[in-house]
Image (cartoon, rainbow, N blue to C red):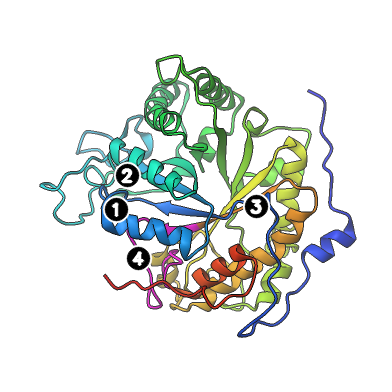
Amino acid sequence: MRPVRPRLLPPLLLVLALAVPAPAGAARSITPLPPTWREGLNVTAFWWQDLSGPRFRTWLGRARSSARAREVTFVIPWFQYFSDRNRSDHLNATEIHRSPGDARTCRRIGSSFTRCKTPSDAAVAAAVRRARSLGLRVVLRPQLEVGRNARTATERDLVQKGPGEKRAWFDSYKRFLSTYARIARDTGAEGLVIGTGLSGMTDSEDDRAEWRAIIAELRSGALMGDGRGYRGELTYTAAWDSIVEDAKDPEQHLFFWDALDLVSISAEFPLLAEPPDPTIGALTAAWASSTTGLPAGPAQLVRNIQAEYDKPVGLSLGYLSRTGTAAFPEKSDFDQQQAGGVVRESAQARPVRAAFDVWTPIAYDGGWFRGISWNEWPASGRGGVKDGSFSVQGKAAEVEICLRHAGVFTPRCRRSSLRR
């Protein structure tokens, strides 16, 4: 394969792209997003009823009307764990399970992942059709979680299999993925994410060969078992820390995006360790800085990846509304609270605004940037000013996203009500 040299941004353009924004005010000038930008939200569904019922219909409608989204990504969990209740080392499991639910057995939200967490296939298909009827572009993101319950849960990037287990794991993963490939194909969903943050299962040539085979089977329909392939957009979402080595050396392909349609990156790069609630200007500058130990600024690392694979790029990105989130965007709300973070709307809204300020000019330069899908927009509504989670609903970050998606300052952009 001929080496691909990175096409770096000229210094002047990089400076312009990372310019410090004007101070915030009651009203301000908003730069419209380019037509190539997909105004996206990650619609998370971690309860069996999350993609059905009146609350879902309300919040899906608000994604369109209140957040001005043009694209939604439905995030749907399955779980890796041992069926044997005596096992707790679920990272070693090769079994991947849905977590089915019904009204009789799911009367309350429990800590077990074995029941009540995965929406039914019929609910997912109906959700896709409803979203498309509202004029939304739809992406399905089936997502692997690890653990039998909250106590045994662990990060998916730690999943790694030796030669003896790899075949069984990939066979189980393909059964999981085929479920949503069929739904995406049959409902006309525009995109399918084939994996998210599985760093330990993408880091060898053998692993990457498995993923390439999966991609081929998705296209041909062999994965679905009926010879009717998926013709929509395919991508894989990599964790931010897994792209660093690849971005440093464009002559080695450490992913398989060349076989896909879109590069997708979960872009929770650490920006600033101090202060706990940085200014918009400091956050904007941090996207160009390598002061957090990275070999280059996060924006340049993403640009290098784009140049290496010569594919369009989209980001998945989110922040807690809790101080300290800019230093450790990956941390859960619980972990950030334990680290001393306090609920504060600006700790979320400022990095959201900074990300728009950084990536909007880059999107205009070259046409390869496809925008940001914001994490998160809970399918059945959750958030508000006292909530420290990634949800943007009912918070200043929702207003910021609305303004940027609208492309103009308008008083119609305001916090959604969380009242039931």
SS at badge 3:
loop
Residue located beneath label 1 in the image:
150
Residue located beneath label 3 in the image:
37
Dot 4: within a 10 Å radius of its alpha carbon, few (fewer than 14), some, or many (20 or more) residues? some
Q: From the viewer's perspective, tell me whether residue 405 is left or right of residue 125.
A: right
Which residue shows up at 51% across the image and 74% down it? 412
Do residues under tags 1 and 2 come within 8 Å of each other at their CB atoms? yes
Q: Distance between the residues labelled 2 and 3?
A: 36 Å
Dot 2: within a 10 Å radius of its alpha carbon, few (fewer than 14), some, or many (20 or more) residues? many
State the extent of the magenta-drawn residues as a range: 375-394
Image quarter of residue 32: bottom right
SS at badge 2:
loop
The answer to whether residue 326 is seen in the rendering is no
Quadrant (top left/top right/bottom left/bottom right) for the N terminus: top right
218 and 283: which is toward the camera: 218
- Where in the figure is residue 304, as x and y percent of width and height? 76, 45
Residue located beneath label 4 in the image:
382
Q: Which of marks 3 and 1 is in front?
A: 3
Q: From the viewer's perspective, tell me whether residue 192 is left or right of residue 273.
A: left
Q: Is residue 174 above or below residue 414?
A: above
261 and 37: which is toward the camera: 37
Q: Nearer the viewer, mark 4 or mark 1?
A: 4
Residue located beneath label 2 in the image:
147
Q: In this view, does 226 lie above or below 361?
A: above
Q: How far apart are marks 4 and 1 (CA)?
A: 20 Å
Do residues under tags 2 and 4 come within 8 Å of each other at their CB atoms? no
- At label 1, the amino acid type is Ala
Quadrant (top left/top right/bottom left/bottom right) for the C terminus: bottom left
